[in-house]
């Protein structure tokens, strides 16, 4: 059989195919979870912070400038923090494959990831778009019940689509396009670090465990340590703003007192 079909795929190559599939699914999960966590952070910030409320005493667009500025700053920092986990996942994949499985395993890891991403990205884009299309189908009044009555936006079907769109949105806008960048960066990083790996992993497998430990530490830091640092920076900047406002208020009071004193002296001289 081997004379006809050729030598079977080695155990390192089989493990590389499996690792490529597992790491691709892990990256997809990390991306979707990061997107949902960012949305939850926005909701909590809008509910708890009064600084993002509309300034009703000002005309448009001045009533929205300060709240939108605050939301933009918060969204930028939060989004950057949520990117760390998928980024660490992407950097760790070629190093794990090269050190645990050698160059043969790394080559088949890229092949397995490439084939899976081609199918998975199309599936995620189409499934996310289907939720959006179904929602528009109801909004345009095209969905009807058995009696021919139009099912509108106030129906239970539309509410269910709103829940489904929370998952369909990340599928369509985040996970699907991110997989294309994932395989590109994975291939380039594997090519750049090719000199770190050997053909077989007998002498390099210990570095794979070190890579796993380092990745877990970085993920924990991005989840907890970075959040603590950002909260401290936010509190510090807020205290500086309050102190600056107090200083400006004190200067205004001193200017008013100086003006009152000068007016009094002028009045006395006139008298």
Image (cartoon, rainbow, N blue to C red):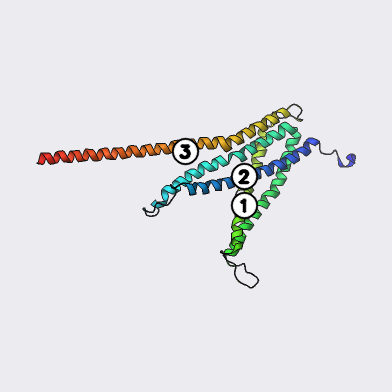
Which quarter of the rendered picture does the C terminus lie within? Answer: top left
Label 2 vs label 3: CA separation?
26 Å
Residue at the disc numbered 2: 31
Q: Residues within 10 Å of mark 2 (few under 14, many from 20)?
A: many
Check if mark 2's residue and mark 3's residue have beta carbons within 8 Å.
no
Q: Which mark is residue 91?
A: none
Residue at the location (71% across, 31% down)? 99
> In screen coordinates, is 209 left or right of 141?
right
Residue 195, x across and y down, in percent:
69, 29
Per the rendering, the mark at residue 234 is 3
Point out the residue furthest to the front here: 48
Q: What element does badge 3 sit on?
A: helix
**Separation of disc 1 and disc 3 at Cα?**
31 Å
Q: CA distance from mark 2 to mark 1?
A: 12 Å
Horizontal arrangement in the rendering, residue 252 relative to residue 91 (left or right): left
**Comes first in the chain, label 1 or label 3:** 1
Q: Nearer the viewer, residue 226 or 140?
A: 226
């Amino acid at each position: 059989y081997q004379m006809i079909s050729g030598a079977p795929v080695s155990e390192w190559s089989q493990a590389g195919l499996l690792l490529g599939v597992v790491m691709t699914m892990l990256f997809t999960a990390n991306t979707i979870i990061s997107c949902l966590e960012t949305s939850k952070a926005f909701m909590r910030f809008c509910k708890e912070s009064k600084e993002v409320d509309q300034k009703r005493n000002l005309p448009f667009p001045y009533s929205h400038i300060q709240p939108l500025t605050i939301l933009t700053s918060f969204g930028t920092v939060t989004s950057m923090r949520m990117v760390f986990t998928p980024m660490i996942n992407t950097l760790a994949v070629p190093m794990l494959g090269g050190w645990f499985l050698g160059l043969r395993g790394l080559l088949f890891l890229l092949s397995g990831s490439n084939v899976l991403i081609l199918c998975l990205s199309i599936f995620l884009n189409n499934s996310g778009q289907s939720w959006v299309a179904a929602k528009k189908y109801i909004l345009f009044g095209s969905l009807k019940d058995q009696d021919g009555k139009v099912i509108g936006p106030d129906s239970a079907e539309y509410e269910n689509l709103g829940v489904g769109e929370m998952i369909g949105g990340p599928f369509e806008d985040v996970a699907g396009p991110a997989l294309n960048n994932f395989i590109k960066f994975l291939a380039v990083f594997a090519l750049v670090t090719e000199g770190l790996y050997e053909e077989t992993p007998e002498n390099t497998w210990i570095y794979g465990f070190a890579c796993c430990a380092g990745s877990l530490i970085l993920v924990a830091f991005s989840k907890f340590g970075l959040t603590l640092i950002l909260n401290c920076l936010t509190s510090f900047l807020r205290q500086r703003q309050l102190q600056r406002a107090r200083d400006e208020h004190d200067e205004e009071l001193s200017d008013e007192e100086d003006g009152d004193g000068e007016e009094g002296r002028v009045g006395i001289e006139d008298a």
